[in-house]
Image: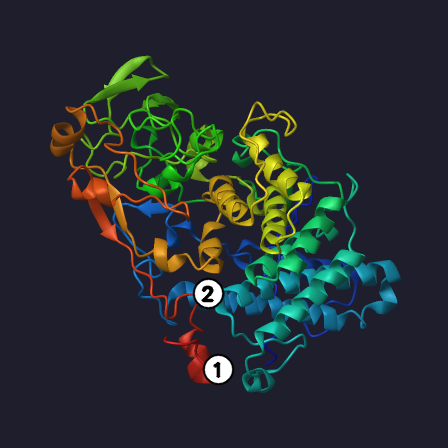
């Protein structure tokens, strides 16, 4: 058996979004060693690599941004091993995709008689782009991986050893460079939308950033910006809704379709209990406190912050990300206050039992917060099957990657401030030149700008699978993932210690340190909040994931340190 022979069942064609319309088409079947002998078969092979299973993204539950009641993950309780199910899945699925792409590239010469030179060039470029994306994920998470760009039989595959990570990175760069040089920048309305030059440049910038290769990251991001085809979506909150398709900001995404049974499920935990969900997955207080005030200052420095009204005078992304208290949300007024036993049903204009306060429902949000970002009324339709796009990378990320890379290179100029201010001004729905309408970044200090770009990334990308690799590459994971998770006191004690003294919602203003991390220790020691659970992160090993145990045992691969 060849480990790279394709066996196609009916799979869903995921067209890569590149600032154009989407196309979803079902594929037919095919399997043989003579596959990929014409354009139709090659396109079917490449289409199969756009399946969701091959585009795993990091879980915000692995970070200090998102909590699930009092539960922890194998990453946040430091029990990660090479036997973890998701570790094995990431490794196997990624190498499966790589194997299929290598077979396509290897098969192109066989199909040359039926392809035009332009088709050959485009297919090769797209395949190399897909291969680079897959290897990028392996390299950033596992570090010491096996690299091959050739189809192999089992014996050859088992004989492979891990490659020098720097060599792998250079191979990834070569693939992205080839793709950027040979893929179109966009497609016409009548064409199926696939990988583009902009996608290759954006994804190259991302892996370069993950590897602290600031020069390459800045150049790739700038090249993507210079294409002039991407823009920031005018409304930050609308960008993540099901109704928003093919935004001018989206560079790479996977579409979903109820008709084709390709949907986002399992979202009831993000929805309040009154609206038919569980309210079990909630934003952390650390994330909530990271949103700056409208003067551009953190909450412990700004005179605009009122802990009694913590949503007021905050960066607009705060209330676009977290549901503000006593405001409409999914047909009800959301209010976690322990004395709000009944709230308004906006559909019937009647008061109903408030199951979003822990006074009535002990498993309501443990810290009072709920996610708003991307949550919409249509989530509750079609039996909770959701057509929301899966955004892999968007233009705001390119702008902030460019700014961060230039800051780290200490090449600070107006272009850096322009990139930061473009993202920040969009949050306020104003033109960046209107500096009176938002807190524009003006500092030229490398240390100050480093803090600003990190804070900007946290406000901008919450719940998008970005935070995990940010805290890994910034060496912050050992700090933020060894802090307790805090929440509200139980209702009776909450009334006595917080509500009656007039201290609702935050009894005190938590200090924010140089890394933008809130310290809830003083409130906890004063007995005003309670500890939900304690995260753990083992810095001696967890900055890299373990190689899956079966691969170590059967292939002789060397395990990453301290696993």
Q: Is residue 97 visible?
A: yes
Q: Label 1 crowding class (10 Å Cα cut-off): few <14, some 14-19, many 20+?
A: many
> Which residue sits furthest front?
445
Q: Report whether 138 appears left or right of 340.
A: right
Q: Which part of the image, by quadrant, shows the C terminus?
A: bottom left
Which residue is at 59% across, 43% downward?
444
Q: Marks 2 and 1, how far apart in space?
A: 17 Å
Task: Tell me, for residue 169, which label it has, or none.
Answer: none
Q: Report whether 118 appears left or right of 105.
A: right
**Mark nearer the N terminus (2 vs 1):** 2
Q: Report whether 293 appears left or right of 124.
A: left
Residue closest to the eye, 348 or 430: 430
Task: Tell me, for residue 89, which label it has, or none.
Answer: 2
Q: Is residue 114 above or below residue 387?
A: below
**Residue 41 percent coordinates (x, y):** 73, 62
Which residue is at 65% across, 65% downward?
131
Say what secondary structure mark 1 lies in.
loop
Q: Is residue 259 above or below residue 163?
A: above
Residue closest to the eye, 34 or 180: 180
Q: Is residue 261 visible?
A: no
Task: Tell me, for residue 557, which label it has, or none.
Answer: 1
**Residue 40 percent coordinates (x, y):** 76, 58
> Which residue sits furthest top?
349
Residue closest to the eye, 480 or 11: 480
Q: Report whether 224 appears left or right of 165.
A: right
């Amino acid at each position: 058996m060849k480990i790279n022979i394709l066996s196609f069942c009916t799979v869903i064609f995921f067209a890569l979004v590149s600032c154009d319309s989407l196309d979803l088409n079902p594929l037919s079947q095919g399997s043989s060693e003579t596959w990929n002998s014409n354009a139709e078969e090659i396109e079917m092979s490449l289409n199969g690599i756009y399946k969701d299973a091959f585009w795993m993204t990091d879980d915000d539950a692995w970070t200090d941004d998102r909590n699930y009641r009092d539960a922890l993950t194998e990453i946040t309780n430091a029990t990660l091993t090479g036997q973890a199910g998701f570790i094995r899945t990431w490794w196997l699925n990624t190498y499966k995709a790589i194997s299929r792409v290598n077979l396509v590239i290897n098969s192109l010469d066989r199909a040359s008689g039926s392809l035009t030179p332009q088709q050959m060039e485009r297919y090769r470029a797209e395949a190399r782009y897909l291969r680079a994306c897959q290897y990028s994920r392996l390299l950033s998470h596992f570090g010491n991986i096996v690299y091959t760009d050739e189809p192999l039989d089992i014996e050859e595959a088992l004989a492979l050893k891990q490659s020098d990570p720097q060599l792998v990175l250079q191979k990834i760069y070569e693939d992205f460079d080839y793709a950027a040089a040979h893929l179109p920048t966009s497609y016409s309305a009548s064409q199926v939308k696939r990988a583009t030059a902009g996608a290759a440049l954006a994804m190259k910038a991302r892996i370069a950033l993950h590897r602290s290769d600031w020069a390459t990251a800045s150049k790739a991001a700038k090249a993507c910006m210079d294409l002039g085809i991407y823009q920031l979506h005018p409304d930050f909150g609308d960008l993540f809704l099901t109704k928003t398709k093919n935004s001018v900001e989206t560079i790479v995404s996977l579409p979903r379709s109820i008709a084709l049974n390709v949907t986002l499920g399992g979202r009831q935990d993000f929805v309040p209990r009154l609206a038919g969900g569980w309210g079990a997955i909630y934003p952390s207080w650390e994330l909530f406190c990271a949103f700056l005030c409208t003067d551009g200052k953190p909450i412990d420095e700004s005179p605009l912050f009122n802990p009694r009204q913590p949503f007021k005078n905050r960066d607009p992304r705060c209330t676009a990300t977290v549901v503000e208290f006593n405001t409409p949300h999914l047909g009800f007024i959301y209010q976690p206050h322990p004395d709000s036993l009944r709230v308004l049903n906006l559909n019937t204009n009647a008061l109903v039992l408030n199951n979003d306060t822990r006074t009535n429902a002990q498993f309501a949000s443990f810290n009072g917060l709920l996610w708003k970002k991307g949550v919409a009324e249509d989530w509750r339709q079609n039996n909770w099957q959701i057509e929301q796009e899966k955004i892999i990378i968007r233009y705001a990320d390119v702008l902030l990657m460019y700014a961060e890379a230039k800051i780290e290179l200490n090449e600070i100029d107006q272009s850096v401030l322009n990139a930061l201010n473009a993202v920040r001004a969009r949050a306020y729905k104003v033109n960046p030149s209107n500096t009176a309408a938002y807190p524009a970044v003006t500092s030229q200090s490398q240390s100050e700008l480093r803090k600003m770009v990190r804070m900007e990334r946290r406000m901008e990308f919450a719940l998008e699978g970005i935070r995990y690799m940010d805290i890994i590459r910034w060496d912050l994971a050992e700090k933020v993932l060894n802090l307790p998770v805090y929440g509200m006191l139980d209702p009776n004690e909450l009334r006595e210690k917080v509500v009656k003294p007039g201290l609702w919602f935050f009894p005190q203003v938590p200090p924010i340190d140089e890394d933008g991390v809130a310290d809830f220790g003083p409130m906890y020691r004063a007995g005003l909040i309670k500890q939900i659970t304690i995260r753990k992160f083992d810095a001696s090993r967890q900055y890299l994931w373990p190689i899956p145990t079966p691969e170590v045992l059967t292939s002789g691969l060397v395990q990453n340190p301290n696993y």
